[in-house]
Amino acid sequence: MAPSAMSRWTKSLSDAQPVAYWLDDPGRPHPEPALTGAETCDLLVVGGGYSGLWTALLAKERDPGRDVVLLEGREAGWAASGRNGGFCAASLTHGLSNGLTRWPDEIHKLEELGARNLDEIEAAVARHGIDCDFERTGEIDVATEPYQARELREWYEEIERRGLAEGIEFLDADAVRQQVDSPTFQAGLHDRRGVAILNPAKLVWGLKAACVRLGVRVYEHTPALDLKPYGAGMAVRTPYGSVRARRVALGTNIFPNLVKRVRAFTVPVYDYALMTEPLTDDQLKEIGWQGRQGLGDSANQFHYFRLSADNRILWGGYDAIYPYGGRVRTEYDDRPETYAKLAEHFFTCFPQLEGVRFTHAWGGAIDTCSRFSAFFGTAHQGKVAYAAGFTGLGVGATRFGADVMLDLLAGESTERTELEMVRRKPLPFPPEPFAWTGIALTKWSLARADAHDGRRNLWLKTMDRLGLGFDS
């Protein structure tokens, strides 16, 4: 990058605060007190993000008399649930393509369950009065290269043949630029109903408030230190106390699972995002973004972008950073070299917005597994259930995962627990240095494919055959 160009793009970042925009909110609720002493309950939920909060809420809605305790190591939503892009997708499989590749015989059922799950999220937001800027806007996947436009059209024709294109429309270059005007857009697939956008932190805080109203005892700043059998149930030790429970649901995602054998199935991948200042009406007209749809491009190293309630643009993605050893560290949440790259890409997409400044820049860890969609299981003779591996598409799918965990803990056979997706696990990641080497080689290969009309090299083709296809 030329020095003059670097200066021009990075100037837009001069006032950006290194904090997640959603969490930088004066209305942020105070945390609940930490647990001190001994507790007993019917169900203990570990984790105060979407996975844990949905589990606690659904447990009380299924059985209002059930005694539920939730432990959160820091504050509800401080990690992935409060710092994501705010896309709430119906897909349970990290997109239709991934689901069709892995579970072709179940894909219609998975799509049906995903659509129902998104409807139920919308209903829960209304029922519990959660003010989280929920908008059923849909999403457009855009092509920014001629080969991507061809691939989008071919993909649309394939899902039409399979009866999976309901609510989805192919847009040529003129049509997509009537929706949102970027000189880089060459085609698009518009999913009109399968995606909502929302304020992710407000969703977390609203779910926590709903849980407390229903009688869930929530303890924040209370990490769960270990998990052991205790009589007919389980016991969890915390810094200042303990909890004994008949059943335990683990919603810790990227953080070390209390069931140690589960840890090899996930690795952290760090993702980054920028947020602009609010756009003026004239600036919005310049880019013609009238429908407020979410957007994502079609490269392997892709961007996702959307409008906030006050008409800021969130612009994220592209870099996916795996730290050697799979460590989760606060210092990885900030990466200026990625912010500079994202700013350059933003103004390439929207040159009409030159002069717009970014107010926030942040990152966070995504819990990635080798099949790029959630996996599930039980431990300790069915007294403990877990769900993890949502791979960046957990805003909606975590509610489905909560239902699965509750089904598993009840020992029930349901349409969810009978799914192959639920019954089988992904391949675990190898130990270091093989994990880092494999992920680095995959990232290099994906960048090379993006630069060569999408052509996948031998490494990527091998990963595809093994069911380990990867994108950023």
Image: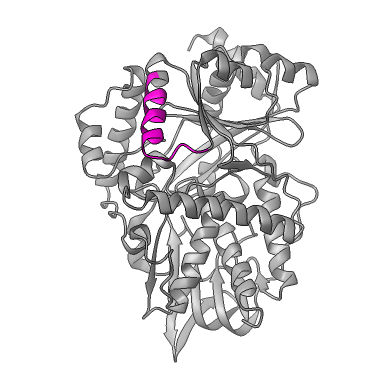
Q: Which residue is drawn at the image coordinates 32% and 23% (left, top)?
A: 449
Q: Which quadrant of the figure contains the C terminus? A: top left
- Let me know if residue 433 appears in the view: no
Q: Residue at x 26, y 51 (%)?
A: 430
Residue 334 makes an appearance in the image: yes
Q: Is 400 situated left or right of 35 in this image?
A: left
Residue 285 is one of the magenta-drawn residues: no
Magenta-drawn stretch, dominant element (helix, strand or loop)? helix
Q: Position of residue 208 (x, y in %)?
A: 69, 63
The image position of residue 329, as x and y in percent, is 49, 49
User: From the viewer's perspective, is 371 left or right of 11?
Assistant: left
In this orientation, which residue lies closer to the viewer: 183 or 457?
A: 183
Instruction: Count all numbered tags in the image, as a single digit.
Output: 0
Pick the front one: 27 or 419: 419
From the viewer's perspective, is residue 175 above or below residue 219? above
In front: 157, or 394?
A: 157
Residue 11 screen position, x and y as percent: 65, 18
Above or below — where is 264 with respect to 201? below
Where residue 347 appears, x then y in whole percent?
A: 59, 16
* Range covered by the magenta-colored residues: 150-166
Q: Quadrant of residue 310?
A: top right
Residue most extreme to the bottom: 231
Residue at 72% over, 67% down: 32
Q: How is the image coloured?
A: one colour
Q: Is residue 417 above or below residue 230?
A: above
Query: Residue 421 falls in which quadrant of the image?
Result: bottom left
* Membership of 161 in magenta stretch: yes
